[in-house]
Every structure is written in C-alpha cells, then in structure tokens.
C-alpha cells in the first residue's frame, strides 16, 4: 500500500481534510515546480546584490560565496539535511534518519505534490540561508573556511531549526509559532549568525574598509530585482498549493516590499541626504524579509504596515551599526536579523483567521500569540548565536578563518581564486593583454 508523506509544518499549512485522502494535484505540482525554480534564482540574485556592494577586488569571491552554497547544500540536503529537518517520527529537536539519502520518498506524496518536489523546494531555502551569512564576512574570510562552515552550519543549525518550526514533531511548531515562509528559519538565523561571524573573524583592514564602497550599483539593482522576482516563489510557494493562500502571500509580498522601499527612500531624504539606488534596493530586500513570516497570515493592508515598520527598524539599525566596532560588512544583521525579528513579532500582531484559519494574532484578540512569537525569536537567536560561535571555532581549528594581511590587501579575487572580475587592460593574473598587433 502506498505510504503518503504529509509534512504538517507551518510552511505546508495543509488542512486535515487533505491529509485524510491525499491525491496528486497536477496544478499544485506545476505551481510548486515553478516556485522552486523561482527560489533557486534568488541565490544567484543574492550573488549580484552582494557582489555589487563590495569593492571590485572582491566581486568574484563575494559572488562565489553564494554560488558555492548551491553545490555544497544541494548535495548535503539530499544526503542528510532533509531527513534531519523533516524525517518522520523524530523528536522535538531533530528529525529521524528514516529519509537518509531520501530513502522511502520515491513515489510518495507530500500533501498534493510529489515528495521530491517538496524536498527540492525546501532545498532552495536551505541553500540561500547560509549564503546570506556571507555578506557579513566578505573581503576577509578564507574561501575554504567559509565552504566548510556552510556545510556544518546547514546540517547542525539550519536543519534542526527548520525541524523546530516546520515539522509536526518540532517543539516550536507544537507551541504554535507562526512562520509562513522563513522569518525565523531563514532570516533571523542568517542575521544572527552573520553578526556572530563578523565578531569572531574581526573587521576588515582599515584600507580595505575605506575602499569598500559599492563598486557596481547596477549589479545591486539587478540582484534586488532578481530577489524580488524569486521571492514570489519563496513566499507564495510556501502555501504548497495553487490556492487562495498562495494568492494572498503573492499580494502581501509585493505590497510590503513596495512600502518598505518607499519608507527607506523617505528616511534617506528626511535625514538630509538624497534617495539612492542602493537605498531603494536595500529597502526592497528588507520589505521582502519582514513580510516573509506573515505573508500567508495577514491582510494586504497589514502588509503595508509591516513593510513600513520593518524598513524603519532596519534603517535605524544600519545607522546604529556605524557607531559600533562590529564589521558586518553588508549589514546582514540589520537587514535580515532586525527585519526578520520585526516581521516575526508583527505576525503575532496582524495574523487573522479571516485570512488564514491557521493564524490568529492580537487583532483577533489572541494576545498569547505575541508571546509565542517572542519565544520563537529568542530560541532562534540563542541557537544561532551559540551554534555559530562554536562552529566557527571548530572550523578555525581545522583551517585558518581569515586571509593574511597581504592577501586581503591584494584582494580576495586574486588571493583566493587567481581571477579578477575586471581585467581592463590586464589579464586575470596581471599579465598585459595585447590590444593590437603582436
């Protein structure tokens, strides 16, 4: 008899009626295949976003930090990560090993879609999350150390956290924490881990930091646009069906992002400067982050408030960062950590049963949900702060974490990869290029 797999997670949001008689739905499957591809595109989009923000000597290394996550996590998720997150009959902390190497999933269903589609959709979340962390340590962390850190972090921090929040066995799921598409699992985890990584590895050289103005703003805008586009799969796909919840998440995602971009540009103008392209891109990304946990739970009007509040909180967190010694190079904590925390808490305020029967917050008179959301945030912060610190120390025992002073001054592209992003009149290793004749 065919066994049907149904991850009853905060992400899946599948009704008990569907669980009773699961059937393959080709419309849902087609949508989820497309949504998975959209989420995959977000990681290259992130590469362009981060790559444009760094100095030209670090563009390739920065972009490769995102791309390499596609390879490392793409393999580890199939071998072990998926079962640690969603393996059935696990405990409150981690999944079982029943699906080790995806054993037992061939021909099975996850709700109304093939289990393999659910595996791939979740893989794209697992891939982009450690890639986000790279923005805090660009231009000084050694590439081998980062690659090893990504492998360990994806298995020992991301997978258990996904289990806590999205698996029916997870303790935060049982507590009732609401996280529609990854406010805690993806963004708070990445933001907190990025802050810890920046502290452990230390700041860039003063000369490197002074030179680290965004070297390619069109790259930044391109990356933000790809992220915005892919985020429709990220959030609307988290309904795991082509239904009304997906439509709601699609709408709230765009609305919150638009509001956040306007808010960021307004703050830039109010503070006596001028609205900038980098500010527009950053505000949009913060809006995407802030709406993620509540996208399928809140009203379109509430999504405007979430975008405005999330962008305001992140904007001022960036201003505060300049007064601190922590060198979170690309403001990962301010944008993803603060944005994710703000969105997670506001989900406890704005979630309404009128928009999703599985979510109810302060607007519905459910004050307890706000407390549950705070518990989820604090648990995520604690796991990621302690876990990231321990993993970086472990990696540091195996291989040096950061470049030497000479390597950093040379630039991470040449020192780590023997390549240059922009040759001008020189070859990739500094050899002259013949522009005419012999």
Image: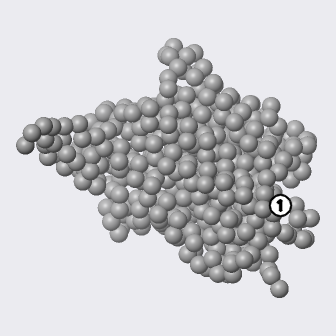
State which quarter of the image contains the C terminus. Answer: top left
Q: Is residue 233 left or right of residue 89?
A: left
Q: Quadrant of residue 210?
A: top left
**Which residue appears at 59% of the width and 58% of the height?**
124
- Percent position (x, y) of residue 180? 74, 51
Which residue position holds label 1?
Answer: 14
- Number of labelled discs? 1
**Which residue appears at 12% of the width and 37% of the height?**
436
Above or below for 85 versus 215 = below
Colour scheme shown: one colour
Above or below for 201 versus 88 = above
Of residues 119 and 34, the one nearer the viewer is 34
**Which residue appears at 41% of the width and 42% of the height?**
51
Q: Circle 1 sits in a helix, a strand or a loop, which is it?
A: loop
Q: Is residue 47 left or right of residue 249?
A: left
Q: Quadrant of residue 26?
A: bottom right
Q: Residue furthest top?
A: 272
Q: Is residue 58 left or right of residue 153?
A: left
- Percent position (x, y) of residue 146? 40, 59
Q: Residue furthest front?
A: 437
State which quarter of the image contains the N terminus. Answer: bottom right
- Percent position (x, y) of residue 425? 19, 37
Above or below for 229 versus 383 = above
Of residues 357 and 20, the one nearer the viewer is 20
Question: Could you classify mark 1 by the number of other residues whose Cα lies within 10 Å: few (under 14), some (14-19), or many (20 or more)?
Answer: many
- Percent position (x, y) of residue 229? 61, 42
Of residues 223 and 143, the one nearer the viewer is 223
**Which residue appears at 35% of the width and 57% of the height?**
143
């Amino acid at each position: 008899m065919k066994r049907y797999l149904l991850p009853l997670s905060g992400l899946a949001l599948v009704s008990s009626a569907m669980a009773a008689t699961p059937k393959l739905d080709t419309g849902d499957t087609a949508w989820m295949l497309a949504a998975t591809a959209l989420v995959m595109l977000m990681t290259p989009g992130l590469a362009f976003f981060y790559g444009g923000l760094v100095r030209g000597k670090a563009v390739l290394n920065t972009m490769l930090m995102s791309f390499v996550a596609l390879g490392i996590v793409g393999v580890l998720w199939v071998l072990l990560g998926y079962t640690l997150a969603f393996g059935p009959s696990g405990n409150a902390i981690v999944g079982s090993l029943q699906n080790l190497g995806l054993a037992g999933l061939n021909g099975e269903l996850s709700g109304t879609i093939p289990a393999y589609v659910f595996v791939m959709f979740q893989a794209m979340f697992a891939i982009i999350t450690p890639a986000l962390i790279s923005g805090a340590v660009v231009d000084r962390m050694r590439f081998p150390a980062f690659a090893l850190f990504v492998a360990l972090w994806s298995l020992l921090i991301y997978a258990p956290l996904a289990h806590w929040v999205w698996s029916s066995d997870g303790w935060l799921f049982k507590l009732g924490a609401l996280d529609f598409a990854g406010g805690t699992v993806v963004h708070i985890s990445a933001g907190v881990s990025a802050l810890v990584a920046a502290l452990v590895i230390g700041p860039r050289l003063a000369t490197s930091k002074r030179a680290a103005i965004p070297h390619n703003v069109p790259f930044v805008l391109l990356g933000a646009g790809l992220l915005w586009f892919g985020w429709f799969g990220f959030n609307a796909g988290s309904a795991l069906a082509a239904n009304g919840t997906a439509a709601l998440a699609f709408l709230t995602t765009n609305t919150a992002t638009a509001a956040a971009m306007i808010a960021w540009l307004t703050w830039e103008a109010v503070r006596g400067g001028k609205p900038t392209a980098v500010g527009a891109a950053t505000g949009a990304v913060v809006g995407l982050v802030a709406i993620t946990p509540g996208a399928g739970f809140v009203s379109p009007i509430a999504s405007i408030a979430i975008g405005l509040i999330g962008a305001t909180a992140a904007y001022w967190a960036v201003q505060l960062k300049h007064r601190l010694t922590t060198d979170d190079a690309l403001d990962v904590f301010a944008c993803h950590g603060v944005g994710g925390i703000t969105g997670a808490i506001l989900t406890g305020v704005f979630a309404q049963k009128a928009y999703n029967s599985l979510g109810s917050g302060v607007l519905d008179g459910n004050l307890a949900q706000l407390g549950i959301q705070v518990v989820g945030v604090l648990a995520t912060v604690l796991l990621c702060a302690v876990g990231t610190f321990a993993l970086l120390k472990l990696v540091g025992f195996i291989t040096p974490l950061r470049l030497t002073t000479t390597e950093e001054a040379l630039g991470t592209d040449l020192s780590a990869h023997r390549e240059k992003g922009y040759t001008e009149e020189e070859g990739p290793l500094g050899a002259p290029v013949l522009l005419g004749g012999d």
